Amino acid sequence: MASQSVTKVLSQDLESTLREDRVFPPPPEFAAAANIPSLEAYESLYARSIADPESFWAEAASELHWFEKWTKVLDWNLPNAKWFVDGKINLSYNCVDRHALSDRANKTAIIWEGEPYGSDGTSQIRKLTYAELHAEVQKFANALKSLGIKKGDRVAVYMGMTPELAIALLACARIGAIHSVIFGGFAANAIADRVNDSQCVAILTQDTSYRRGAQIQLKKTVDEALANTPSVQHVVVLKRSGAEVAMQQGRDHWWHDLVAKADPTCLAEPLDSEDPLYILYTSGTTGKPKGLVHTTGGYAVQTYLTTKYVFDLGNPNHPDDVYWCTADIGWVTGHSYVVYGPLQNGATVLMYEGAPNHPDFSRFWKIIDDHRVTIFYTAPTAIRAFIKWGNEHVEKHGLDSLRLLGTVGEPINPESWMWYRERVGQSRCPIVDTWWQTETGAIMIAPIPGAVPTKPGSATRPFFGIQPEVVTREGDPVPAGSGGLLVIRKPWPSMARTIYGDHERYQKTYWSDVPGCYFTGDGARKDADGYYWLMGRVDDVLNVSGHRLGTMEVESALVAHPKVAEAAVVGRPDDLKGQAVVAFVTLESAHNSAATTPEALAALKEELKKWVSKEIGSLARPEEIRFTDALPKTRSGKIMRRLLRELATHGTIQGDTTTLEDFQVIAKLRESEEG
Ligand code: ATP
Ligand code: MG
C-alpha cells in the first residue's frame, strides 16, 4: 500500500495553520466530578500503563465478569496477539446480565427514537431497561439457535437503527455466532460481496427502514443479494413499518414469530477470550474495504475502559447520563460506542433511527433537548453540515443538558472544532477528538476530558497502555513538530487479529511497512507538548516543489474562510512543481453557484487562492479551485480524495467506488470542471 511517497511526509517548514497556541483546559466543574479528575492523575496512570501494560490491562479486565480467569495476559508473536489467554468471557453477559442481575435492572439501557412523526406530531419512542433488554436478548438468542445457528457461524446483519439491531448483536455474542454487520445503505452487490467473503449462514434484516422521510427497502435488497449467496440458509425479518414484503417459505422467518416461540432463558456461553466476536469491513476511503476480525476478551476490555475514561461513563457522580453516539451500527464506531462500550458501563444509550435533517435541520438538537442528552458523539462531516445549514437551527434549542462532546472519523478542521465548542457546547463542554480505526477496535488517541487540555484540531494524547509514535519509513522517530508516519509500537487488547480469510494481506497491510510496528496508514505530527495532530492519509500527502503538505492543512485553511463550507485538496502531477494543488470546494448555502453570478465565483476563486497563500504560504496556493455542490464521500461520510485525485489527473474515475455514498456526485464533479 505504501508507495515511495511515504519515505518522508508532511510539511516541516511551512508555517502551520493549526494554531497550536489555542489551548482549552478542562472546565474545573467537569474535572471535579470526572472519572479521571486531573492531568496529574492522567499522567501518572499513563506512565504506569506504559511501564507495565500487562498489569494495567489485567487490572482493567478484572472490572469485567469472567467465567474463568486468564492464565497469561498477552501472548505476542508479531503480528499475532492473544490477549487474556485461556480466559473465558461473554460480551453479551458483560453488556446485559451484569446490570440486569444487579440493582441497575430497572435502569434504562436503550432509548430509541424513530424518524417519522405520526399524525399527532410526535415520533415513536421506545425505552428498554436492562432487565427488558436481558429478556429480549435471551429470546432472540434462542430464536437463532432454533434455526440451527451455533458458535462460530457467521451471521450477516443488514438492518436499520432499531433496538433490535443492538439485540441482534448481543444475541449473536451470547451464543458465540460471529456477526458481520453491513451498513443498511449498501446495495445488493455490496451485501453479496460481504456475505460471500465470510460465507454467512443467515442474514438478519427488516421489512423497510426510515431515512430522510423515505422508506428504504431492506428486505427487497436482501432478496436481490440472495440470488448470489449460496451459503445463506435463513433470513430473519423484523417488522418495522409493516410494508408488504415477499417471504420465501422455509428460508424467510418473521422475527416476531421466532421470538414468540422462543424459550425465555438462554444462558451466556462461556467463550474463549480469543473466539471471534465479529467481522466488519472498513469504510473504503482508501481502496477496497477490508474485512477485519475482532475477538472477544481484549475487545471487551478496551471498549469498556475507553468508554469509561474518554466518555466519562459509568461515573458514580453522573448516574443519569444519557449518552448519544450518532454513528450507525454499520460502522465500527457503532459497534464499539453505541453497543459494546457504553452497555458494558451500564449506561443509558440513545439510538436514533434517521437523518439529522428530517423533517428539518434541527432534528438532532431537538432530540438532545427532548431526552436531556448529556454526552454527544458525532463526526466532523456532520459538524460541517450543521455549519453549512446555519446557526439558527442550533440556537433555537437550549442544549443545556450537554456536558461532553466527541468527534471521530476524520481530522476535524480547527474552525469546525471551534464552532462545535461554542455553538453546541456553549463553551462549557470539553471536546474529545478521538482517533482510532476499524482495525484498532477502540479509541487510541483522545483527550481524557477531565484531565487533558484540548487544542482545536488535535486528538491530543494517547489512551492508557497505547504507544503511538511518529516515525520515518525506517521506523526512526522524527523530531517534535515534524510530520511522519503514525505507528503503534506495542500490541493493544482490541486490535483486529486478521483480515477474514487473508492473513497475508493483514500482515502486509499493517505490519510490513515500518519494521516492528503497526502502520496506521495515517500521517501525523507530534508537537512539543506531546500532542498528536492527524494530517490525513499518507497516500494523500502532497509533494509541491519538494515540500510535503498534509491535505488537512490546506483544507483547514480553506474551511477557515467564511464562505467555504467544505474542502478537499488533492495533488495533480505537474512538470514544474512535481504536484500542483487542486482544491474542490463547497460553499456556504448563501454563496453557492445558484446564488452567485459567474463573475463573482471567478473572483472568489482568486480570493481563495490568495487566502491560502496568506494562511500557509505561496507553496500551498491552489493551482486550481473547483466549486461543487457536494464532495464524494463514503457512506460513513468521509471524503474520498483518491477519486478526486483521479478526476483531477485523468478526468475519469476507475478506482473502487463500491462504498461511494452518492454516485451522482461524480457527474456533478465533472461539471465543476467547466464551472
Ligand atoms: P479504508 O481503510 O477502507 O480506507 P477508513 O480508513 O476510512 O477506510 P475506518 O476504519 O472507518 O475506515 O476509519 C479510520 C480512519 O479514519 C483513520 O485511519 C483516520 O484516517 C480517520 N480518522 C478517524 N478518526 C479520526 C480523528 N479523530 N482524527 C483524524 N482522523 C481520524
Ligand atoms: Mg483505513
Image (cartoon, grey):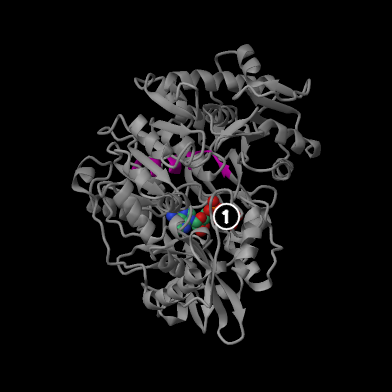
Q: Overall secondary structure of the magenta stretch?
A: helix
109 magenta-colored: no
Residue 335, position as x, y percentages in the image = 52, 39
Residue at the (66%, 59%) spot, across then down: 667
Residue at the (44%, 27%) spot, across then down: 110
Q: Secondary structure at mark 1?
A: loop
Residue at the (61%, 86%) spot, across then down: 575
Residue 220, position as x, y percentages in the image = 72, 32
**Between 111 and 385, the one nearer to me in the picture:** 385
Q: In the picture shown, does residue 33 fall above or below 174?
A: below
295 magenta-colored: yes
Residue 438, position as x, y percentages in the image = 54, 49
Residue 612, position as x, y percentages in the image = 42, 74
Classify residue 575 as left or right of residue 110: right
Q: In the picture shown, does residue 313 fall above or below 261?
A: below
Magenta stretch bounds: 294-310
Asked whether the viewer can see residue 79, the reply is no
Classify residue 22 as left or right of residue 477: left
**Between 53 and 468, the one nearer to me in the picture:** 468
Q: Label 1 is placed on what type of residue? A: Lys
Asked whether the viewer can see residue 110, the reply is yes
Which residue in the protein does label 1 denote?
Answer: 633
Q: In the picture shown, does residue 472 fall above or below 139?
A: below
Q: Quadrant of residue 655?
A: bottom right
